[in-house]
Image: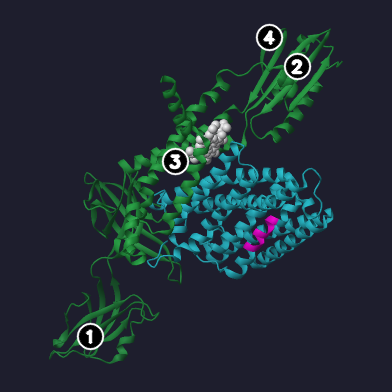
Chain colours: A green, B cyan
Amino acid sequence: MNTKKTTFVDSVWDFFCSLKLTILILLLLSVTSIIGTVIQQGGSAEEYIREYGQSNYELFTKLQFTDMYHSWWFVGLLGLFSVNLICCSIKNFPRAWKFVVSPQLIASDATFKNSANKGEFSTKESIASLLPRLNATIKSHFAKPVETKADGAVHLFAQGGIYSRFGAYMTHLSILVIMVGAMVGTVWGYKAYVNIVEGTSISQVWPRGGETPIELGFSVRCDDFDVVYYAGTQRPKTYSSELVVLDGGKEVLKKKIEVNHPLSYKGITFYQSSYGPAGTGTFELEVTDNQTGEKVQVTTAQGKKNQLARGFSFSVDDFTPNYDRFGPAARLHVDAPDGTHRTPFVIMQNFPQFDARRGGDFSFALKGYNQPQYTGLQVAKDPGVWVVWTGCFMMVFGSMGAFFFSHRRLWVRLREEKGKTLVQVAANAHRNQAAFAMRFEDLIKQIETTIENKA
Amino acid sequence: MDSNLFFNVTTFAYFTAMVIYIAFVVTRSSAVAVLAKLVAVGGFLANTLALGLRWYESYQLLGGDGRAPLTNLYESVVFFAWSILLIYLLVDWKYKQPAMGAFVIPFAFFGMIWAQFGLSASIDPLVPALQSNWLTYHVITCFLGYAAFAVACGVSIMYLIKVGKEEKAENSPIGGILGVFPSARVLDDINYRAIMIGFPLLTLGIITGAAWANYAWGTYWSWDPKETWSLIVWFIYAAFLHARFTRGWVGRRAAWLSIIGFAATIFCYLGVNLVLSGLHSYGGS
Ligand code: HEM
């Protein structure tokens, strides 16, 4: 009864520890991940029905294909992945740790006989006289040796790169750290957006896909939004917003943000993301009365009626920032004193004299157009992001340690036999054996030259 | 002297090197192998010079807005070709197996010919989203990783060709064209080594990409198709390496996994933009 239970637990444990499971999960993750790159994620029901039909859509929702990276089965797979990783580490870590706490100071006869990297010398010199020089050679060409006396022999043991035994564990731990960081971000952070009209401030942002706004606890004002174009082109070079953070009524931070240059305050970061026109713009016009030559400056908005001399009036009907490559232009019309609507005409900012040639009662010049903008900001709070970066560092260093370094060990045994001293050398590396073999050749030459008076 | 001239020289050199390497496989003459190597190195130098010149030209053309030539499809393809040669020459220096050239240089050549004839080489100023040093780190690490996978794939193809013959021949040495191939065991080892170089580079590539995304818009991971495919590639090679640790998956299966991994790499690089984005009427990214 008891034994049966243990074997069941054991086999479950072995299942979760097994590298076969790891490979299976890795391949399953790669195959299933494809689904979400082929089917648009987070679309609306109508879009899916239009694209795939009603019955497929129902299947998709059942299998959560429309948000698959957060589906129960994908998250479950990631969970299984973590359990596998944890179990495997628990099982194997003690073995690696043993190399640290109880290094094998003495090698067996078999090691000296069978090791791929070995050497043997015989000398008339005594152990006592050879030992200091041998120690020094090994220390300067490999690592500082530890001396043990046992079985009538002197044993030296030296090792390097023991950390590389832990590279895999560090890498595996890093994956868990990254997952924890991602969870911290999901639970205690948010992604939101906000539009700020130039000259105004906000103290709330709108979570993506949510309805209730989030209070920032401070406010952010946008003093100016600006688009700069590359000279002579319509290609945007920078989008920038002059932001001011106001906390407790005081200006605490001022920064011009751009794409790739966000602003952070109290763990909340504001990213330049979009922009657009806010409300109606104002026109600056100069009107010349062609009878008197008198000029007046008018500031007006589109559609607004403006009185002129002698009962005339005009309004701006339309505006375009680029009229047939001639630059900003406005369409106007003049109303006569009797109320008749005269033919509309176009004036261009870059050609202020142009309208005089039309020969009406008044001529107009467009001096400027002021369109207030809003700046669209992404807002993110992610207290887990540092955990994620820590995990990434661990992963990079861990995998370098695991792949490019190895735990290298060297054993030397000195034994006096019939008035001679027998020196036996063996060494191994747990990875990258070929590279270590070359290194060992050098080392054994050094050891050979250290040993004098060979027999 | 402009960069285009040197890119043409590069393309021509890679073509010539490819042909001479194939000639080496047929003739088995070591003089031919030396010539092939010389041409390949010459092409690599021309490629390096062309990239440097293009960098310089971007400052001439755009003034202070010049940048490293790693910002659009054309530039990434020619940099990919450069990376393949870099990794190839490193592996060749270590293993001295000229037959590999016949299976690796074609990747660089096809890249160059596509870039030269199919892609726009104009140097345009960067949109705001691409103005970041992270872009440079991201592209360099990703493409060096991809290049290592290209070498691994070429070697795996050789492995699959060779291993069947080796098994049939049992212990007698293999003559003919396959005689100049490294032994299946060496090919298997090179495959593994190349992936061991590529994997940490890909890891760095994904991390720098995530860091950039976080810096540009506050999300280090959003499961968009490009990110997801890079993760798919990462999973495949992680599976390859772990399968290797058990010693079970050497040989044929490892070679196939390496080829599948490289196919996924190319899909991540090109397929996501060229295939997936056209898939949706409502436009993916
Ligand atoms: C950058 C990624 C990774 C690297 C560099 C890496 C490295 C390694 C190494 C070197 C070993 C062999 C350990 C040894 O023999 O001492 C190993 C084993 C293992 N790895 Fe990973 N690993 C990585 C990712 C993963 C992932 C994502 C998983 C997913 C679950 C995983 C699961 C395992 C398992 C289960 C073993 C089994 C070890 C055993 O049976 O002794 N690894 N890994």
Amino acid type, callout 1? His
Identify the subunit bearing mark 4.
A
Query: Which image quarter holds the N terminus of chain B?
Result: bottom right
Q: Earlier in the sequence, mark 3 or mark 1?
A: 1
- Residue B204 in picture, x, y percent from top left: 53, 45
Same-chain check, marks 4 and 1:
yes
- Which residue is label 2 attached to? A133
Is label 3 on the same chain as label 1? yes
Q: Which residues are magenta?
A: B103-111
Is residue A253 shown above or below A356? above
The residues bearing labels 3 and 2 have C-alpha atoms spaced at a distance of 47 Å
Q: Earlier in the sequence, mark 3 or mark 2?
A: 2
Tags 3 and 2 both on a single chain: yes
Q: Which residue is mark 1?
A: A333
Residue A207 is left or right of residue A425, and the answer is left
Residue A445 percent coordinates (x, y): 79, 26
Check the residue under mark 1 and report the chain it is in.
Answer: A
Say which residue appears at 51% left-offset and 61% top-offset.
B271
* Residue nearest the viewer, comparing A372 with B19: B19
Is A396 situated left or right of A329 in this image? Answer: right
Per the image, the residue denoted by label 3 is A389
Q: State how far apart marks 3 and 1 are (Cα).
A: 62 Å
Closer to us: mark 4 or mark 3? 4
**Secondary structure of the residue carrying numbered label 4:** strand
Most common SS among magenta residues = helix
- As measured in the structure, the alpha-carbon distance from the residue carrying label 2 to the one carrying label 1 is 104 Å
Tell me whether circle 4 and circle 3 mark residues in contact (CB < 8 Å): no
Q: Secondary structure at mark 3?
A: helix
